[in-house]
Each structure stands twice: as structure tokens, then as C-alpha cells.
Image (cartoon, helix red, strand yellow):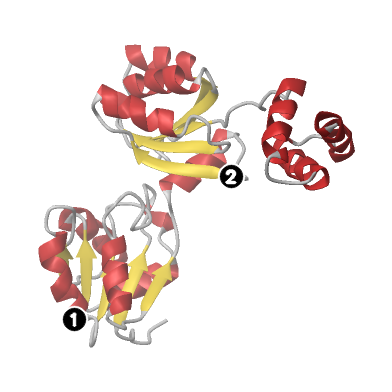
Amino acid sequence: MNSPLSPGLYIVATPIGNLGDLSPRAAHVLTHADLIAVEDSRVTARLLHHIGVKRPMQPYHDHNAESVRPGLIARMGSEAIALVSDAGTPLISDPGYKLVRDARAAGHAVVTIPGPCAAVAALTLAGLPTDRFLFMGFLPPKAGARAAAIAEVAGVRATLVFYESGPRLAGALAALAEGLGDREAAVAREITKHFEEAVTGTLSTLAARYEAAPPKGEIVIVVAPPGEAAPASAADADAALADALTRLPASKAAGEVARALGLDRKALYARALEMKG
């Protein structure tokens, strides 16, 4: 673990609360990097103090990324540059992807050092389906844009994950209930810290809970996927068959509709012959 780092970009996940979650590999990279690109140097300085090292840091965030990135790319040809966020995995809800893109375009090595991520940690706490999930980051602050963003994913058959702040939490939960229906959800906060909690319930119940007492700390909202869609009706099947028969013979039309609507192909084929006859 004392070997020097090869030149390139190192994407380093850092703790989201408990400093004990910093991996030995992440500590090694931070100890030996020639430069660390940071979201907030004060936050990263505390982490470096925890592992007993001091390293040069360069702020890299939304407000200066365009001007700072070329210099970082140039240095990667001969130096090891580590990228960190204030907490968790870089590139999750931050501008780091452009640094990765440009580093690859310049022919530099890009190495990931995986670790904590609040979105994934909240999924493990929520007790909701995890086979498919969609990370949405922060909802827009304005009501109209927020409602539009929610409507865009209302039909997605996956668990939804959002980041939110304490003062906006109740409003976000109420907007989600209105736009998605009163689904099951979880609010996870202070993940890995002493007061870690995951409160579950319907979106409306959670909105009422936090309206009276907005919480502090970093917050993740996890929302269950929509319920099972109603089975296709005979009228739905006939309409789909009528359309398919304008393009396909009866057997292929029946197969297309069976796949699309989850219905029995043989029954659809018989119905297609009736409609053609």
C-alpha cells in the first residue's frame, strides 16, 4: 500500500458521515495523490486530518469547473489527481463527469475507488424494491418545475430516489404524493451517523410528519414503484390487433400484441382471424 500512484485521475468515494467508512485504498490514494480536486477544502481538510496527512487541494465545483478543468487535465499527464466530493461518491449529483470525459479524451488513465453513496445506502434502509431504481438527485425548487419533473417519472416502474434538504422536505413529499399517488416511501437521514434513521410510511403521512418538524441533516427520499398496471381489456386487445393487422399477417400481428400486452398468443390469433374474416 506504500507504492506511488501512476499519473491519471482517481475518483475517490469518501464517507457520508462516519469517517470509519473510508476504505484503506481510498486513504492510500488520498495520501499519495499529487493534488486533490475538492468540493470544499475545509471539508476535505478534516478528512485528511483524520488519516494524518496534508496534501495540496484545488477547489473544483459548479462555479469554477469550466476554468479549472483544463489545468487539471494537463497535470494528469505526469501527476496523480484525486477527485473527491464533500461526502460520498463523486459524480453523483455533482459536475465531475466532465472531468472524467475530458481525462479520457486526453488519453489519461481514469481509476475509480468505490465506497459510500447516500442514494445506495438509503435504498438498503428503505425496505422497498431494489431490483430497479432511478436516481433523480434534487427536485427543482420551484413548484411548476418540480411538478413537471415528478410527472416525467410517474410511470417509471422502478423505485425512485431523491436527495432533499430539511426545510424543503415536507413540500417535496407533498408534491410527490400529488404527482405519483400516495405510494409507500422512506425518508432516510443522518446515514452512518449516530442519529441515523429511516422513517417509512405513505408519502402523505410522511409529508404531515415533517411539516410540523422539519429535520436537519442530509436527507434521501425513497419512493416505491407504481402498483401493477391493470390487465389489458378485450377492447385494448382488439384495438391493438386492428392496428397490427394493417401491417402484418394474422400470426405475426397476434405475436406482436401478445408481447406488448402480455396476453395469450393463441387466443389473439383466433381473434385476429375473426377480425380479418
Of the 4 image quadrants, the one containing the C terminus is: top right
Is 155 or 253 nearer to us in this picture? 253
The answer to the question of whether label 2 and label 1 lie on touching residues, with beta carbons closer than 8 A, is: no
Q: What element does badge 2 sit on?
A: loop
Q: Disc 2 or 1, which lies upstream in sequence? A: 1
Q: Position of residue 227 (x, y in %)?
A: 63, 26
Which residue is identified by label 2? 132
Task: Name the residue type under label 2.
Answer: Arg
Residue at image coords 38%, 87%: 3
Q: Is residue 8 above or below residue 276?
A: below
How far is the residue under mark 2 from the one under mark 1? 39 Å
Q: What element does badge 1 sit on?
A: helix
Local packing at callout 1 (Cα closer than 10 Å; few below 14, some 14-19, many 20+) is some
Viewer can see residue 166 = no
Residue at image coords 53%, 31%: 155
Local packing at callout 2 (Cα closer than 10 Å; few below 14, some 14-19, many 20+) is few
Task: Name the residue type under label 1.
Answer: Arg
Q: Is residue 196 above or below residue 211?
A: below
Looking at the image, residue 272 sits to the left or right of residue 259; the answer is right
Label for residue 242?
none
Q: In the picture, residue 191 is in which quadrant?
A: top left
Q: In the picture, residue 263 is in which quadrant?
A: top right
Q: Position of residue 214 (x, y in %)?
A: 31, 20
Viewer can see residue 75 = yes
Label for residue 75?
1
Q: Position of residue 162 (x, y in %)?
A: 40, 36
Q: Position of residue 275 (x, y in %)?
A: 81, 29
Residue at image coords 33%, 58%: 90
In this view, the residue farthest toward the front is 277
Q: In the picture, residue 217 is in which quadrant?
A: top left
Residue at image coords 60%, 34%: 127
